[in-house]
């Protein structure tokens, strides 16, 4: 269901639906920011129909279930919503809200969703792909550069051959053009997707490198260029950006790769610690 948006799918199906199905379809297309947070019962009540009718509507649109439909609708909205629209969803302008409570509960809900739904096989595939490549570039842009910097920095603490590059920096193209053949490039992309990352992904594919995409949405436009792909599931639409799920996933990847390094890990980290000490890089209580 990723080639068309939810709204396009519903509009294409609308004429062939039952009258009650058309009411549901029209409600969703006209009020997507409300429908995305509704339970089956709430959507049925809003459309003055039954829960069974809602389930039949979802099935007729080709979704595996209500959860699948909601995730696709969330993905559609998360890709296109402006900052102002996101602010409205989060009640930014509403006085008297318990924001700390809302933020913490939202993050806990997201983390539970991550734990319950992430594709373990794809996650293990990502670990294997990174472990098997001697030269690894990590890139991102805007918010996702925060994640790519964390991943690149962390990987360089447990192994050699890791380089972090900025997706917004045109010199990244120079670096990748001169990189060893079939290098692995890990690109982290989060909504809303910067055009510079799409252009860079196209270049990476054209150069014959291997692109591993880590993203938060199965509608990410960079998917078409990636040989490997991991979606980090998120259960809400963030105001500025969701950080917890992506950071937890990256921390797992780093720790799992470290656990497989054997004696090479100890040797690499001893060398780093010696460099830190000799060059007075880190604060030392014993100095």
Image (spheres, rainbow, N blue to C red):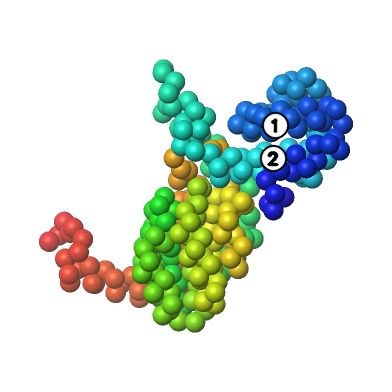
Indicate which disc residue 7 carries.
2
* Residue at the image point whose x is 47% and y is 43% from the top: 242
Element under disc 1:
helix
Q: Nearer the viewer, residue 286 or 243?
A: 243
Indicate which disc residue 155 carries.
none
Q: Position of residue 71 (x, y in %)?
A: 65, 42
Q: CA distance from mark 2 to mark 1?
A: 8 Å
Give the mark nearest the N terminus, 2 or 1. 2
Q: Quadrant of residue 14?
A: top right
Q: Nearer the viewer, residue 269 or 40?
A: 40
Above-or-below relation of 176 to 83: below
Inspect this view and state whether residue 260 appears.
no
Inspect this view and state whether residue 274 appears.
yes
Q: Position of residue 285 (x, y in %)?
A: 16, 56
Bin the neighbour count of mark 2 within 10 Å (Cα to Cα): few under 14, some 14-19, many 20 and up.
some
Q: Residue furthest bottom?
A: 181
Bin the neighbour count of mark 1 within 10 Å (Cα to Cα): few under 14, some 14-19, many 20 and up.
many
Q: Residue furthest top?
A: 96
Does the CB distance between marks 2 and 1 fall below 8 Å?
yes
Can you say which quadrant of the picture contains the C terminus? bottom left
* Residue at the image point whose x is 49% and y is 34% from the top: 86
Above-or-below relation of 279 to 88: below
Element under disc 2:
helix
User: Residue at label 1?
Assistant: 28
Above-or-below relation of 189 to 91: below
* Residue at the image point whose x is 60% and y is 60% from the top: 223
Q: Residue furthest left?
A: 287
Q: Position of residue 269 (x, y in %)?
A: 33, 70
* Residue at the image point whose x is 67% and y is 45% from the top: 5
Q: Position of residue 96 (x, y in %)?
A: 41, 17
């Amino acid at each position: 269901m990723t080639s068309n948006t939810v709204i396009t799918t519903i509009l294409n199906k609308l004429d062939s639906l039952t009258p009650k199905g058309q009411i549901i379809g029209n409600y969703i297309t006209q009020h997507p920011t409300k429908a995305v947070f509704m339970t089956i019962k709430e959507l049925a009540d809003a459309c003055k129909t039954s829960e069974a009718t809602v389930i039949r509507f979802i099935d007729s649109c080709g979704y595996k279930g209500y959860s699948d439909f909601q995730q696709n609708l969330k993905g559609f909205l998360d890709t296109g919503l402006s900052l102002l629209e996101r602010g409205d969803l989060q009640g930014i302008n509403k006085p008297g809200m318990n924001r700390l409570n809302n933020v913490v509960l939202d993050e806990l809900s997201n983390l539970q969703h991550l734990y319950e739904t992430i594709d373990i096989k794809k996650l293990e595939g990502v670990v294997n792909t990174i472990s098997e490549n001697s030269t690894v570039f990590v890139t991102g842009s805007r918010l996702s550069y925060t994640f790519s910097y964390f991943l690149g920095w962390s990987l360089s603490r447990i192994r050699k051959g890791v380089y972090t590059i900025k997706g917004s920096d045109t010199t990244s193209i120079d670096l990748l053009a001169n990189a060893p053949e079939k290098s692995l490039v890990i690109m982290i992309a989060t909504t809303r997707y910067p055009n510079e990352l799409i252009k860079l992904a196209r270049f990476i594919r054209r150069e014959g490198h291997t692109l591993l995409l880590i993203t938060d949405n199965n509608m990410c436009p960079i998917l078409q260029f990636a040989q490997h792909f991991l979606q980090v599931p998120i259960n809400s639409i963030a105001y500025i950006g969701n950080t917890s799920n992506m950071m937890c996933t990256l921390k797992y990847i780093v720790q799992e790769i470290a656990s497989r390094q054997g004696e090479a890990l100890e040797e690499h980290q001893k060398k780093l610690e010696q460099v830190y000490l000799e060059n007075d890089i880190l604060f030392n209580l014993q100095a």
